Image (cartoon, helix red, strand yellow):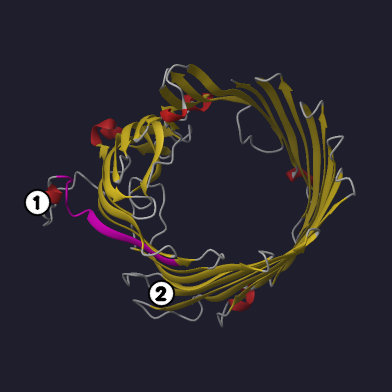
Amino acid sequence: MAAKVNAQDLTHFKENKSSVHGSISATGIFYNSQGITPRKTPFSYILNGNLVVNLKGLVLPFSFTYSDRNKSFRQPFNQFGLSPKYKWITLHLGYRNINFSKYVLGGHTIFGAGIELNPGKFRFGAVYGRLRKFTNQATNVNNPLNDTITSFTRKVMSVKIGVGTKKTFFDLIIMRAADDSASLDPSAIETGNFPATNLVTGINSRIAFTKNIHLELEGAYSIYTTNQNSTVSINAPEFITKIIPVNLSTMGYMALRGLLEYRNRKGLKLGLAYRRIDPGYKSMGTYFINNDVENLTFKTSFSTFKRKLRFSGSIGLERNNLNTARNATTNKMIGSAMVSYDPVRIFGITINYSNYSINQQPGRIQIADSVKLYQSNGTFMVMPHFQFFNSKNTISQFVSLVFSNMKLNDKNPTAGYNNSFTTINNMLTYGITFIPVELSVNTTLNYNKVNMTAGNSTNTGGTLGISKGFMKNKLSLGLAANLTQSVNAQQTMLVFTPSLTARAKLGKHHSLLLKANMISNNNVTNNNLSSTEQIGDFSYVFNF
């Protein structure tokens, strides 16, 4: 799998020319509040840049982000990186998001250097850098000893080697990451915050058996040592102990994903997917992976009547407690279906239905009826829409409706009656656009009601928006306002959120953008709990 970063192929440029193109933007953010503790600073700024420099055939695409927020927190918000590419060679320098495998190194920001080589069917990639910068930041100035965020500098090295094409390939990925124990002063380390080490080996493959049938496999095994300093060793193969420390805090986890899919030219898809993630699975090369889960899913989709009628659906089983360490096992039945029908140009309708059931079974101990989880959650939604044009196609109108009903049925014999609830959501949207004069008006009315044993709550409101373009859309203005009333047994809230948006294009290269909005929370029941916030953004963008 290639890295998910921007790169530029030098073969798209002539070697006897030099050029620079891209964009640079500067944004100032203003904030003010009354009645509540401020959630932002009164002023902050962000600088962004995306550039492609072509120096007689040497093409260097790069990007950067700089913000004043870095002054108050040690984790880097200011980032700069580039990924020049020539034919089958790609370099990664600076801050990059590399994706070799979702279970090994998947989308984590790295500050460092990397290379990818794809000559023909050979696939190679390597990266070395820093996953995380050390942090020792007090979050509460009144109690810095107890409220402090600390983390070690974390470095990574990963290699991918494989063979194949986009349709059929096999990759082997290895990653080693470790915390630098010397990056933090011992006195600043929180109790239980130890330097960790991680070694992950994974595969990523796709096999096309025929033009219509293919198999996808992705898996990894992660060896994670949570405390490098532990002196209690355990038996492990010598080739592993030479790479990472193995001790009593070392654990091994496995992740596996597979998909067998059939497709034909008429749009029919049939797929059988399997996924199993061990309890506790983690990799330093990913931000988060949902673990302790196993599921088997069948899915299908097709279209007919010249693609006017479309259907997609899936049904499957899911469970947790894979190592039987939990007190109970939760089994889920997962199913969903969607039908979309557009018989004529002016009308269409979409129907969605999903049903999820959960049933806990005893694990290590017997489950009392009062705490047993046994629920079903069903959602039904109908969305018809209409679109009209006048005879000259200068005026278009759009109308859509949403009728949604969601019901949670808790079948617990003791507490289920109190936990069950029903949600009704209805929404009507109308919009009209006068194309010659660049004027659009839209409005939305919505109604939401939640019925529970403890009490009901309703949200009723509407939105009105107007946008107008001038001088062939070189200048555009937009006004919008939303008013919502929320009522429950305890209080009544009236929320008003007006907003203004203005955009101006100054020639070919310059543009200005202004956004301003207010959030007014009026507590009708207790005016002392009312609050107001004002937020404004002003941006300048230079394109070249």
**Residue 9 in the figure: left or right of residue 162:** right
Q: Nearer the viewer, residue 514 or 434?
A: 434
**Quadrant holding the C terminus:** top right
Q: Secondary structure at mark 2?
A: strand
> Residue sitting at 63 percent across and 74 percent down?
418
x then y, percent, for residue 276:
36, 65
Residue to which mark 2 is pinned: 329
x then y, percent, for residue 176:
25, 44
x then y, percent, for residue 464:
83, 45
Please tell me whether residue 260 belongs to the stretch shown in magenta: yes
**Residue 505 in the figure: left or right of residue 59:** right
Q: The residue under label 1 is which amino acid type?
A: Glu
Q: Nearer the viewer, residue 297 or 340?
A: 340
Residue to which mark 1 is pinned: 238
Segment colored magenta: 243-261
> Residue sitting at 34 percent across and 70 percent down?
322
> Residue sitting at 30 percent across and 46 percent down?
121
Q: The residue under label 2 is which amino acid type?
A: Thr
Is the residue 472 above or below the residue 277 in the image? above
Secondary structure character of the magenta stretch overall: strand
Judged by depth in the image, the label closer to the viewer, 2 or 1, is 1
Q: Nearer the viewer, residue 415 or 506?
A: 506
Mark 2 closeness class: few <14, some 14–19, many ≥20 residues within 10 Å: many
Please tell me whether residue 496 belongs to the stretch shown in magenta: no
- Mark 2 to mark 1 CA distance (whole Å): 37 Å
